[in-house]
Amino acid sequence: MSSSRFSPALQASDLNDFIAPSQDCIISLNKNTASSRRLQFKPKENAVSTKPQEEAVKISLKDCLACSGCITSAETVMLEKQSLGDFINRINSDKTVIVSVSPQSRASLAAFFGLSQSQVLRKLTALFKSMGVKAVYDTSSSRDLSLIEACNEFVSRYNKNQSSAGKEAGAHLPMLSSACPGWVCYAEKTLGSYILPYISSVKSPQQAIGAAIKHHVVQKLGIKPYNVYHVTVMPCYDKKLEAVRDDFIFSVDDKEVTEVDSVLTTGEVLDLIQSKSIDFKTLEESSLDRLLTNVDEEGHLYGVSGGSGGYAETVFRHAARALYNREIEGPLEFKTLRNSDFREITLEEEGKPVLKFALCYGFRNLQNIVRKIKMGKCEYHFIEVMACPSGCLNGGGQIKPVQGQSAKELIQLLESVYTKDVLISDPFDNPITKRLYDEWLGQPGSESAKRYLHTDYHPVVKSVTSQLQNW
Ligand code: SF4
């Protein structure tokens, strides 16, 4: 997949974001590749080079480490500018536009406007539909699909691990969650092939709803998948990088189809609301599209208690039940270790730990855990890994603290809003996921589930770095 889907072309003024005076290179825009947003690094004219014929180094989105460093920042500025405009253009095209909203984005807007999450989704539905969007879904059901597949994968790995040395295919423990593209991108680009087999093969909720819409819902509706423009509303910019992965693009009638065509951050949706001078608080509410949104008769939405998707909690409960016949009632008590972003929980049988799970958020904690895995000293069976400190509620695309509000106060508010007005439920009880398995996927872990809801990871050669070293 090329990056040509990003348009419009990069403007010369955008290059200012990339050029730092201290850099040993300048960056130029190749006119022939401007539309594909490819940049080229070229040595400065006065730079000493022993290889004058060396080809210019190309940098694209694929080189982004999602590290919040220079390339990400610059790409972020561009993507931020383009996504909203592109979204509005697509609404005015002949495509069927569908929007899927993450629960973290819902919570961020609910906290900002002082509304319930259900009200936010109803008002967003009204807003988007007034602009021409055909359907607005909540991604909680696709998150439940991802959670069910993760539960199934974990039990399979655990059983294989118990009966092998742990290094055969599909037996690697700890299983590392895969819903955070910042973490996956970092692992592929900096940790190499050693760590990748530990990462769960399950797609994130964003890509799971993309697969459900482009592979299944379109068939029910009698639409060609390439005639649907699917937009997600997410808490971070890294979701934009995730959406353009080659693994999430397929072909129908010789046409390229992308599971998720565009990603808007929560902040961009707020920009949209404010740019239209809409009084969101008093905006009329619309009924919800129930095809993929799980809502009860009274209109309550369903959720899980973990602000980053509830992976550790859901898999822990399921594994205790499936492997040790233990039903765990009530909230799980995670023990805080060196900081609140590193917590663990253990299930014991006859005084011996049989399940040891951890939440590991932020790159500092993440690097420590990776070091332990590499040294063979990691005692966990499952780790919910998230790149952002405090997890997805604190994603870089969420609405920023208001004046007088600290970042910590905002996170506390979001954590309470996230579970306040939703019905906490077991993903296995979700009638929408049950229907999707019945109609489309078969069983958890089936060949169809693997085909549509699982993915691969690829160690990436550090092309830029290695080529720069050869100068
Ligand atoms: S942890 Fe941060 S980077 Fe990762 S998916 Fe969540 S919001 Fe995005």
Image (cartoon, rainbow, N blue to C red):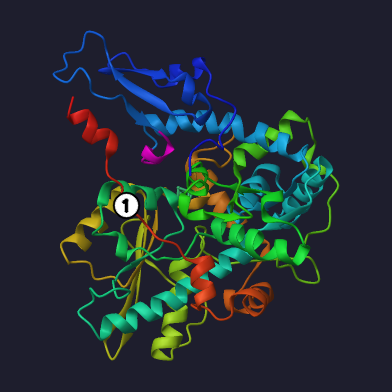
Q: Is residue 229 above or below residue 172?
A: above
- Is residue 289 visible in the rendered image? The answer is yes
- Is residue 390 visible in the rendered image? The answer is no
Q: Is mark 1 within 8 Å of ligand 1?
A: no
Secondary structure mostly seen in the magenta stretch: loop
Farthest right residue? 284
**Residue located beneath label 1 in the image:** 187
Q: Is residue 103 above or below residue 80?
A: below
Give the quarter of the image for residue 87.
top right
Farthest left residue? 50
Q: Which amino acid does the dot numbered 1 rest on?
A: Ala
In the rendered image, residue 440 lying in the magenta stretch gets the answer no
Residue 238 image position (x, y, % from top left): 47, 44
Magenta segment, which residues? 60-67
Give the quarter of the image for residue 251.
bottom right
Q: Is residue 361 left or right of residue 293?
A: left
Q: Is residue 15 above or below residue 236?
A: above
In the rendered image, residue 62 lying in the magenta stretch gets the answer yes
**Which secondary structure, mark 1?**
helix
In front of the other: 119 or 35: 35
Residue 183 image position (x, y, % from top left): 38, 51
